[in-house]
Amino acid sequence: MPDLHALPHLSLHADGVLWVGLALVLATLMGESVLRLLRWPRLIGFMVAGLLIALGGGGIEALALQPGARAVVDAALAMLLFEIGHRVNLRWLRANPWLLFMGLGEWGLSLLVGWAALAAFGLGGMPGLAVAAALACTSPAVALRLSGEFNARGQVTERMLLLAALGTALSILSVGLLTGWIGAQTALHWWNAALRQVYAIGGAVLAAAVLAWSVNWVERHFDFADEGAALLLVGLILLVLSLTRALHWSSLLTPLLGGMMLRYYSQRPRVWPRHFGTAGGVLVVLLFLILGLSLDAHMLVEGLSAGCALALLRVLAKLAAPLALGRPSGLSWRQSLTLGLALSPAAAVSFVLLLDLGASHLVLPPALLDAGFAAVTVLLLAGTLAARWALGRAGDIKDRSAGR
């Protein structure tokens, strides 16, 4: 008779793999549901799934991401930033300089009105300016998801991608410089803080050049249109990301500049699977899931008033620049209006910049970060829906529900 004691002891204790699997299943179901029933972007469902888990007691503190969760966020952002960087044709700015003026205008105006909104709540000063700078850019992740998921094509979509990339670069640089400046005010030797920022930015430029050269060299031997070969591209991006993290270079600026350099020196756009295949797609799902998990109800309630004011003024600023400069750049009034709305979303880059500000040596009022995270939440949910509607009204999304 067999000895039943020889069988392994069964444990019904749920491990981390089970919870990750359940979260992915819920996020996928929510994403498909909002897309099929409402024609909303899947990322809304991904984030709502994370929010539901967080409300059920399974959330994580926004300012205390575990190393594993932060690694997922950084990896997903690195791929998205490289992807949108490669979509940017810098020679277009030379041919149409009004686009550059529009990009600088909408970002700068968003910065100023955001700073003014925070100052009205007693949260101004240099720390408030840094938070406003983090929120001034349009989300490259949302722009790419809208473009790919709804097959959006047209002048408004292309300009949305370009301005999102330019604004992201400006936000990353400005937050780094402001962090160094604020730190220099309290340091005995101000040049030490300045030197750290020069080191971080200079290293990012060097790493970006290495990444662009590596991708260009590998492409001669592999076809990135194949999903298996696209994994090699993911590996290259993650290797460079690991290098920048180890050397304390800017891990956000590196992939964005790398993609821009690759496109600038080789005008032929590459064809590869969206988000570089299945592995990248899973990371993007996890990215928005983690954003939802990080929404702390107490933080959102405390910062809701300032966050909503900041979000509203930012949306108006995004509208003002395209309406003022859209006609000289070659857009109609309708396209200018829809472009301004398409620039509304803020998401993962702003979230990470706020995380880094909160984890820095700077002493920031808790209410300031509460307002920042509340604004990110509003601009991710409402801003993404506004951008989806705007692309439909612009005619860049070809379906019957485009104007919904």
Image (cartoon, rainbow, N blue to C red):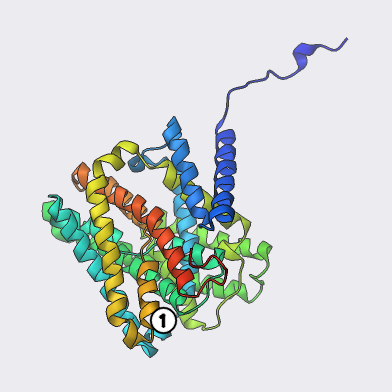
- Residue closer to the observer: 283 or 136: 136
- Residue closer to the observer: 375 or 228: 375
x%, y% of residue 373? 31, 48
Against 224, residue 305 (above or below) is above
Is residue 182 visible in this depiction of the protein?
A: no
x%, y% of residue 128? 18, 55
Residue under label 1: 90
Against 97, residue 386 (above or below) is above
Specify the quadrant of the image occupied by residue 314.
bottom left
Specify the quadrant of the image occupied by residue 99.
bottom left
Q: How many marks?
A: 1
Q: Residue at x 37, y 88 (%)?
A: 96
Q: Residue at x 51, y 57 (%)?
A: 40
- Residue closer to the observer: 76 or 342: 342
Q: Residue at x 32, y 80 (%)?
A: 100
- Residue closer to the observer: 218 or 67: 67
x%, y% of residue 257? 41, 70
Is residue 317 visible in this depiction of the protein?
A: yes
Q: Is residue 363 left or right of residue 256?
A: left
Q: Residue furthest right?
A: 1
Q: Is residue 389 left or right of residue 375?
A: right
Q: Residue at x 25, y 44 (%)?
A: 303
Q: Residue furthest bottom?
A: 95
x%, y% of residue 199? 30, 63
Q: Is residue 94 left or right of residue 187?
A: right
Against 309, residue 204 (above or below) is below
| Label 1 residue SS | helix
